[in-house]
Image: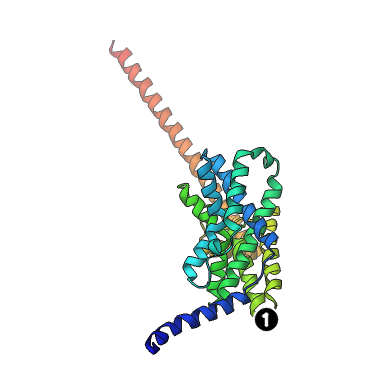
Amino acid sequence: MSASLAATAPAMLAAISSSGLAGQMVTVPIGFEMLAVVAASITGALTAREQKLDLVGAVCLAVLCSLGGGVLRDVILQVGSVYILDQPLALPAAVITAAIAFVIPSLLEKQDRLIAILDIFAVGLFAATGADKAYVYGFEPIVCVMMGFFTAVGGGMLRDICLGRTPNIFQRSNFYAVAAIGGAIAYVLVADAGVSNVIALIVCVSTTMLLRFISLAYDIKSPADMDIAEAIHRSRRQVRNTTRPETTRRSLDELEGRRERVQADIARRRHLERRKAALDRLRKHRKARAHRKLDV
């Protein structure tokens, strides 16, 4: 009996500590939570219609977009509860939203701006909850940021993988994944400063949306095909050209002018030589004709 208690004690302590930690996690109002799930589900269902998928495909993509990131986070962390199983409203909300968006797409045809706003709001909220779970369970800050990133954009990544295409978050575009990373970093910094996790959540969502809107307003895109060494070399060359003394520029101009004059003189001499050679051939031809006439 005592041996069995000793064997089960670690598991019981782990369960107790887990429940205590779960109670410290940020509490998101159920309305905002379901709004984020619905917004992400709409994007998945609309993508399914663009790809000419059936209703089952639309539901699957909607579930992946809205809940796939949380599944990735929970599988990687392996602590606490699994959100898709722990929240009884999440899966039905995603499925119902996908069915409505698929069957009655006219409701969403002219709501592109609203859907975009709700989508980036969902990204910010998911980034906060993902970073919060890792932070509460004592993981390192970089892990918290990574979990916020996976929770925010992991669903879209899984959607694109299922469609057999390069995930949009890996392509050059206006800030989306970068905005999620920025929001997760903001959450970790604010929470690490001892501020309430609710305030950290608000800061995370605000930072994510702000980065997204700034990138859209000024057409700022994530970098691609960078070569820092070449950029540094080019900037140094430009600095040398702009700071070169006026005398050096004048001497270069004079050298260029002299080179042009020499080339022009060489061209003129070649022209004269060709002309002289042509005249010599003409005289020889005339002499040859005169000798032929005398022979006749």
**Looking at numbered disc 1 in the image, what kind of residue is underneath it?**
Gly
Question: Would you identify the image quadrant in which residue 211 lies?
Answer: bottom right
Determine the secondary structure under disc 1.
Answer: loop
Residue drawn where x is 61% and y is 63% of the image: 126
Q: Is residue 146 visible?
A: yes
Q: Residues within 10 Å of mark 1 (few under 14, many from 20)?
A: few
Q: Position of residue 279 (x, y in %)?
A: 43, 28
Give coordinates of residue 65: x percent, y percent. Answer: 56, 53
Total residue callouts: 1
Which residue is identified by label 1? 194
- Quadrant of image for the N terminus: bottom left
In the depicted view, which residue is nearer to us: 214 or 225? 214
Relative side of 82 to 219, left or right? left
x, y (%) of residue 277? 41, 32
> Does residue 174 appear in the picture of this structure?
no
Pick the residue in front: 227 or 100. 100
Residue 106 position (above or below residue 209): above
- Residue at point 48% right, 71% down? 78
| Position of residue 61 in the picture relative to residue 34 (left or right) | left
The answer to whether residue 24 is above or below residue 116 is below
Above or below residue 45? Residue 123 is: below
Which residue is found at the position 53% from the left and 54% from the top?
64
